[in-house]
Image (cartoon, rainbow, N blue to C red):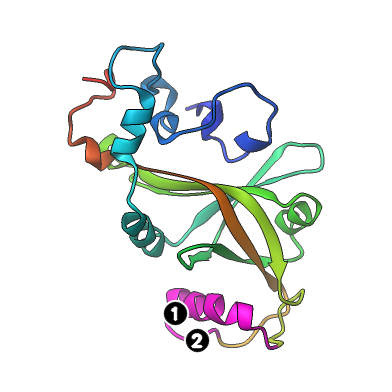
């Protein structure tokens, strides 16, 4: 199914007069809620109602294990790939292969959009977080273990999260990217409590 333009990870890079994406329109086309589509609560009010609290967002990002990271190719087209990540409460960290299209893209254009979501099986279980911002390289390329106070926290979190302990050695193929989000959107359709339906989101 086609997603609305504001849903796509590369939406912030497209030239458009569309209103900024909000949690209220980060849903499938056939249930998108706008003031023109049907009467009911304003999208801003609905977005607030289904947004995650900071604590809920931290817990969700700690629970999920894969992020989809959107980058910009040389011709302006999107490139989206799954990647492991860690969230330290303020920044997203990615341990990326440096000989990859993703790496080439971010060195040329650091703008990215990251999406972590869940609840694919049921509409009222949909929940997720979208972050928009820029990435920067931290540490050597590739990472070989040079002392780096900035990387102590991310590497500890990454090792515990994916390997059950400290990050043990370096393969000479990866390096770190840090994303400082400038916009964050979250949604948790479980908060709707069944008061809406797919055919009538405002019911």
Q: With respect to residue 28, does 185 lie above or below?
A: below
Mark on residue 138? none
Q: Report x, y in % for residue 159.
A: 50, 79
Work out whether residue 43 or residue 188 is closer to the camera in this orientation and state it.
43
Name the residue at 33% across, 48% down. Answer: 52
Q: Which residues are magenta?
A: 147-167
Q: Determine whether, in the image, residue 139 is placed left or right of residue 108.
A: left
The picture quadrant where one finds residue 18 is: top right
Name the residue at 75% across, 75% down. Answer: 142
CA gap between label 2 and label 1 equals 6 Å
The picture quadrant where one finds residue 123 is: top left
Q: Are marks 2 and 1 in contact (CB under 8 Å)?
A: yes
How many numbered dots are placed on residues in this image? 2
Mark on residue 166? 2
Report the residue that reaches farthest toward the left.
Answer: 194
Q: Please identify the dominant SS of the magenta region.
A: helix
Q: Which residue is mark 1?
A: 160
Q: Residues within 10 Å of mark 1 (few under 14, many from 20)?
A: few
Name the residue at 61% across, 78% down. Answer: 151
Name the residue at 50% across, 81% down. Answer: 156
């Amino acid at each position: 199914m086609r997603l609305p333009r504001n849903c796509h990870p590369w939406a912030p890079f497209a030239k458009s007069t569309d209103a900024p994406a909000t949690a209220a329109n980060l849903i499938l086309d056939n249930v998108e809620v706008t003031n023109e589509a049907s009467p009911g609560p304003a999208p801003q009010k609905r977005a607030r109602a289904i947004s995650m609290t900071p604590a809920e967002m931290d817990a969700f990002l700690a629970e999920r294990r894969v992020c989809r990271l959107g980058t910009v190719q040389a011709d302006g087209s999107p490139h989206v790939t799954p990647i492991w990540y860690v969230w330290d409460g303020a920044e997203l960290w990615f341990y990326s292969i440096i000989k990859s299209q993703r790496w080439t893209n971010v060195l040329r254009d650091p703008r990215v959009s990251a999406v972590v979501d869940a609840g694919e099986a049921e509409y009222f279980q949909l929940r997720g977080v979208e972050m928009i911002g820029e990435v920067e390289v931290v540490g050597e390329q590739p990472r070989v273990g040079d002392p780096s106070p900035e990387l102590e926290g991310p590497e500890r979190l990454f090792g515990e999260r994916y390997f059950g302990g400290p990050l043990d050695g370096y393969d000479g193929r990866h390096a770190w990217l840090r994303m400082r989000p400038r916009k964050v959107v979250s949604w948790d359709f479980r908060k709707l409590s069944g008061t809406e339906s797919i055919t009538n989101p405002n019911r």
